[in-house]
Amino acid sequence: MADSNTVVTTQSYFSRIGNSIKGIGIGVILFIVAFPLLFWNEGRAVKTAKALKEGAKTVISVASDKVDPANQDKLIHFTGKTATVDMLMDPIFQINYNGIVLRRKVEMFQWVENASTETKKKVGGSEEKTTTYTYAQEWNENAVDSSNFYNKEGHINPPMNYKAEKYVASHVTVGAFILPENMISSIGGDMPFAIDEAAAAPVLTAIPNAYRLLDGTGYYVAAGDAIGTPAGCAPKVVAAATQTVGAIVNGLNNVQSGTQTAQQAGNTIANAAVGTTRAPVVGDMRISFFVVPQQKDVSIIAKQNGNTLASYQITKDRSLQMLQNGVKTADEMFTSAQKGNTMITWLLRIIGFFVMFTGLKMVFGPLGVLADVLPFLGSLVRMGTGLLSFLIALPCSLVTIAIAWIVYRPVLGVILLVVAVGAIVMLFKNRKSAAVAA
């Protein structure tokens, strides 16, 4: 089920010029911010890589079944299975679980608004925007605030009566070692938790509009005024009887008030009486559960601190503490961490470049708007300023990274700086040649 609304707005030429001029300030800020971001990232990458390399030389592998006092304050590596005596409990849905994590996932069937905008430049510099708001009903884990919709009529979402929750064991061990809280929360590998009929019975009694999902993975809480058993759920005799009585009363009232014919009311009563299966309606909720069981293999690198663990200080601003799922050697863990550091470094480099590039495009933005008196001319100017922004942002990014490398990696930094300077020289030569040709 979906519907839509279309809104057309027009912005004048002079208003667009004013907005683009305001954007220059934001563009300058973005351009400036990109430099320290790129420089900081290189320092972070080098310091992290050095810390991991030093840790790989320092770490010693030990058995997890006993604590050796001789290893106090040393960087140790061990593997083992997690264990806990903690009983995790979801008080609302009456689930008790002896494990590492118990997580409640909540979804609600609700209205979602999607907006798509088509922009057309007009001769004279004005701009016409056609925005289409589309409404659809979807399952969503986040509560969608329908009060912000463009068209609120018929698209109202009720509040989510149940929220997602996560219960984590506070006392977890691996062999003879007690894990700190931050390590416990990083243990992954959750799986669906099945609820049998006996365990579900008291919940279905306590929550009259709740149903048990047929696959046993959780509950379906129907909207308060919904009639019929939701698809994929086990029918409830008590609920069906209550719905039937309610349908009879509603049907008779509607006939009396003239809002329904006797035949229509009879159909409603008949449908309820046979316990028909229905599709989701807005306000329906699905609640499922996931757990991280104990006896999971984990690999750990950290400082031995008595019979527990802590971060191992490598340098003044770098420390080591790692937990990875599965049985892994110390070398495998450090290799994985180095790969992660490299991925983060490249991601931040790309982000830094695009922040700089976007800032320059905003600085040059008014030129494209001024040329929009003729739409095709504005498009050509934007292509030109976009290319110019790229040709400025690329060498500026490389120079920044090169300077950072000169500080942190002198040999590689000099090489990169030469490449960056060469790119800048070529840029100015090309511009000079173009000017002479003109």
Image: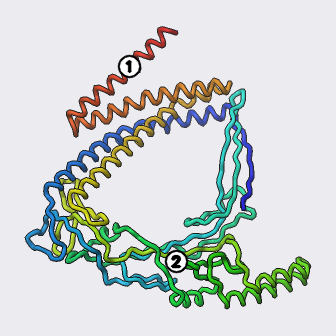
Camera-nearest residue between 413 and 360: 413
Quadrant in which the N terminus appears = bottom right
Q: Earlier in the sequence, mark 2 or mark 1?
A: 2
Rendering colour mode: rainbow
User: Which residue lies at the image location 64% right of the left edge and 60% below the top edge?
Assistant: 112
Q: Quadrant of residue 111?
A: bottom right
- Under mark 1, the amino acid is Met
Front in this rendered view, residue 403 or 171: 171
Q: Is residue 21 above or below residue 48?
A: above
Image position of 15 with respect to 285: above or below: above
- Relative to 252, does residue 434 appear above or below in the rendering? above
| Residue 404 percent location from the top left of the image | 27, 37
Q: Which residue is mark 2?
A: 217
Taking the spot 69% from the left edge, 41% from the top edge, the residue there is 129
Side (left or right) of 404 relative to 305: right
**Splitting the image into 4 quarters, where does residue 330 fall?**
bottom left
Within-10-Å neighbours for mark 2: few <14, some 14–19, many 20+: some
Q: Is residue 164 positioned above or below 421 on the image?
A: below
Q: Which dot marks residue 36?
A: none
Q: Amino acid at mark 2?
A: Thr
Question: Is 414 positioned to the left or the right of 21 in the image?
Answer: left
Dividing the picture into quarters, in which one does residue 239 lie? bottom right
- The residues bearing labels 2 and 1 have C-alpha atoms spaced at a distance of 63 Å
Q: Is residue 350 left or right of residue 69?
A: right
- The residue tagged 1 is 426
The x, y position of residue 23, in whole percent, is: 54, 37
Residue 427 at x, y percent in the picture: 41, 21
Dot 2 lies on which element?
Answer: loop
Disc 1 crowd, CA 10 A, few/some/many (<14, 14-19, 20+): few
At 43% from the left and 72% from the top, the residue drawn is: 191
Q: Secondary structure at mark 1?
A: helix
Q: Indicate which label's residue lies in the foreground, 2 or 1.
A: 2
